[in-house]
Image (tube, rainbow, N blue to C red):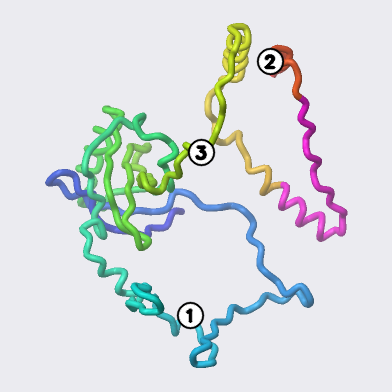
Amino acid sequence: MPGTFWKGVISFGMVAIPVTMSVATESKTPSFHYLHKKCLTRPKQVLYCAEDDEYFSVKETVRGYEYSKEQYVVFEEDDFDKVPVKTAHAIDITGFVNEKEIDTIYYSGSHYLEPEELGAKPFYLLKTVLEKTGLVGIAKVAFQRREHLCCLRSLGKIMALHTLHYQQDILPVDELNSPEQKLTKAELDMALKLVEAMTTKFKPDEYHDEYTLALQGMVEAKLKGVEIKAPEMPKIEIEDLMKALKASVAAAGKR
């Protein structure tokens, strides 16, 4: 069950819609701990101050912003709840855009939004409008100690909030290279035919994290003392492109 971690309002023109936000995803990857190789004991993290020559705990720390060489402005934990931005308790919608205009490289995280009891009707109204128009609301909201750019869209009975990378977060592609190649009509037609043969419906339940499953298998193998062999690097053979395409189309047809 998703856990609520933020409460506030969706600011939609002059309308305020009280909502709660919860996480939409969680990692299923097995966790591993650092151990002392000699005795397989989990180490304890120790903080040491060279100035006072003493060890201390995390509870005895504060956060500091270095504004000059070894000069800090100190922040207590509750100071971060006082950052004076209106998006601290509001998802401030600034406009609406076609969802297709947002390149997928901008998407970061996903969250669920559901209405508080008082906001049920305006929430449903906004969700329905987004659903009918194919638009998403562009907004900003502050949580986890930063202000996020985000978009809101209809998702079943609720709405989804997707955090987006800011433009300055996206690394340039200018230095990357993929030179243009001359393609024959036959090659292009055969590639299109292969794509058509492989086109299907997206069914998320058909895809599984094979790495995690294999990792769990390794845990069981190690418990049984079974030797584990690393997978071999596949051999890369540059062959006739048309021949490879035709064979791929034939294989896709059989599947």
In the image, 122: left or right of 202? left
Give the residue type at disc 2.
Answer: Leu
Q: Compared to 97, does 149 lie above or below?
A: below
Magenta residues (range): 214-237
Residue 221 on the magenta span: yes
Give the residue type at disc 1.
Answer: Val
Identify the mark at residue 19; answer none if there is no mark.
Answer: none
- Circle 2 residue: 245
Distance (Cα) linking label 1 and label 3: 42 Å
Q: Secondary structure at mark 1?
A: helix
Give the residue type at disc 3.
Answer: Glu
Image x and y of residue 218, in percent: 77, 53
Mark 2 and mark 1 in contact? Answer it, CB < 8 Å. Answer: no
Q: Residue at x 63, y 11 (%)?
A: 187
Q: Residue at x 48, y 80 (%)?
A: 58
Mark 2 and mark 3 in contact? Answer it, CB < 8 Å. Answer: no
Image x and y of residue 78, in percent: 31, 74
At label 3, counting other C-alpha atoms closer than 10 Å, the crowd grade (few under 14, some 14-19, many 20 or more) is few
Q: Residue furthest top?
A: 186
Q: Quadrant of residue 81?
A: bottom left
Q: Secondary structure at mark 2?
A: helix
Q: Secondary structure at mark 3?
A: loop
- Circle 1 residue: 58
Q: Which tag is nearer the camera, tag 2 or tag 1? A: 2
- Circle 3 residue: 175
Q: Earlier in the sequence, mark 2 or mark 1?
A: 1
Q: Earlier in the sequence, mark 2 or mark 3?
A: 3
Image x and y of residue 165, in percent: 39, 46
